[in-house]
Amino acid sequence: MTTTTTTTTTTTTAPFLSAFPDGLKTSGQHAPDYSLVRVYKDFPKQMTGPTVWDAADYRDHPERWTHSFTSDEVAEIGASADRFIEDGTPLTGITKEKFPLPKLSERLNALRKDLLEGKGFFRFRNLPVTEWGLHKSAVAYMGLGTYLGYFLSQNGRGHVLGHVKDLGEDPTQTHRVRIYRTNARQYFHTDAGDIVGLLCIAKSLSGGESDIVSTHHIYNILQRDHPDVVKTLVEPNWYFDRKGEVSAGQEQWIRGAVMYLENEAERPPRVSAKFDPNNVTSLSRFNSGPDARIPPLSEKQKYAMEVLERTCKENSLHMTLAPGDIQFLSNPHVFHARTAYTDYPRGAMDENGKPRPQRHLMRLWLAVPQGEGGWKLPFPDAANKKRGGIQVDDRPPTCPLDAE
């Protein structure tokens, strides 16, 4: 069964620019170009290089993947944020040119390369989010993000600044609830962009820690111990729920694989992943009953999901984000998860007598297109500047400062 896809064409007319201030539109969810999807025999028996890492290499060495902003760096970020706010440009129109960081730009350019071609993860610390408040923190965060990629819409409402926060929604209603809007555990997955960023605004009472793992390390383990699982994961017969976030004329699901192989002639091709288990277990409304339109998960697929999750969990690097921390991850070669969490009771006060906020992370999905160093993925929008994300019709981008 095929899936209807629409390739985005960007124009620069005045009405377009009024809705999309940076002149770019998120391309949205697409099925792969099936002619570019490689079969199992083409996949390498083992991945090598800096994208393959063991959690033990980093667990006791946070200095290898953490940088605390210095007072001078915080001042540079803050001054650029203040100028941007004073200028009055909509936050959806922020660009690298409108957020100059003459001293930090070199570090951010190196980080971009490491995210795309190296270990694929990093953590910044010490952004003064409590002092700055939501607006200035959001400007600073998105300004930093402009040095790494292009902002993507993260849901059907056009949020290019997302918010990971418990809104009291029922996590068992997986066919219509996005798990980031609950306090439930998130299984190992990838997001719908090349890079995902998380800025911690407030911590929970307990839980909510982050777990990450090298996809290529997991791939090597599976090729060694469970090659049958890898064979199942690379077959493009998985169906992924779009949870109603579709444009007119599009199907409610996408058919694809969990792992893909780059179509790369200049160097050994890399294995990439694109997977969220919640989006494959939520399709019962379409794969059961007299009106079934797609097949249910096979026993091989269920087994592959179980082995993949267990292997990721056994080999993950665990980290905690404190207020002012920013985590950046590369989705093609890093799986990430989150433990369940409990917020402070309503009305709880901190040691200074101030109300404790709910756990709150600001999220960015960033695209790095194929022509600008991004991975050569087998999707029809691979060359789009804002490839991936979730775009419903011509819904314009928006940057709410809190969850809604």
Image (spheres, rainbow, N blue to C red):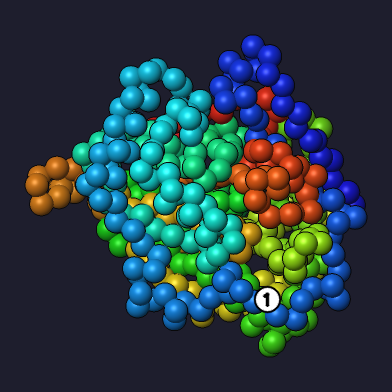
Which quadrant of the figure has residue 268? bottom right
| Front-lying residue, 285 or 47 | 47
Residue placed under numbered mark 1 in the picture: 47
State which quarter of the image contains the C terminus.
top left
Q: Position of residue 42 (x, y in %)?
A: 84, 72
Q: Position of residue 25 (x, y in %)?
A: 65, 30
| Amino acid at the residue labelled 1 | Met
Q: Is 321 on the left or on the right of 372, as rendered?
A: left
Residue at position x 86%, y 69% from top?
39
Q: Is 154 on the left or on the right of 198, as rendered?
A: right
Q: Is 366 on the left or on the right of 62, as rendered?
A: right
Residue at position x 76%, y 28% from top?
9
Residue at position x 32%, y 38% from top?
77
Residue at position x 75%, y 32% from top?
8
Total marks placed: 1
Residue furthest out toward the top: 14
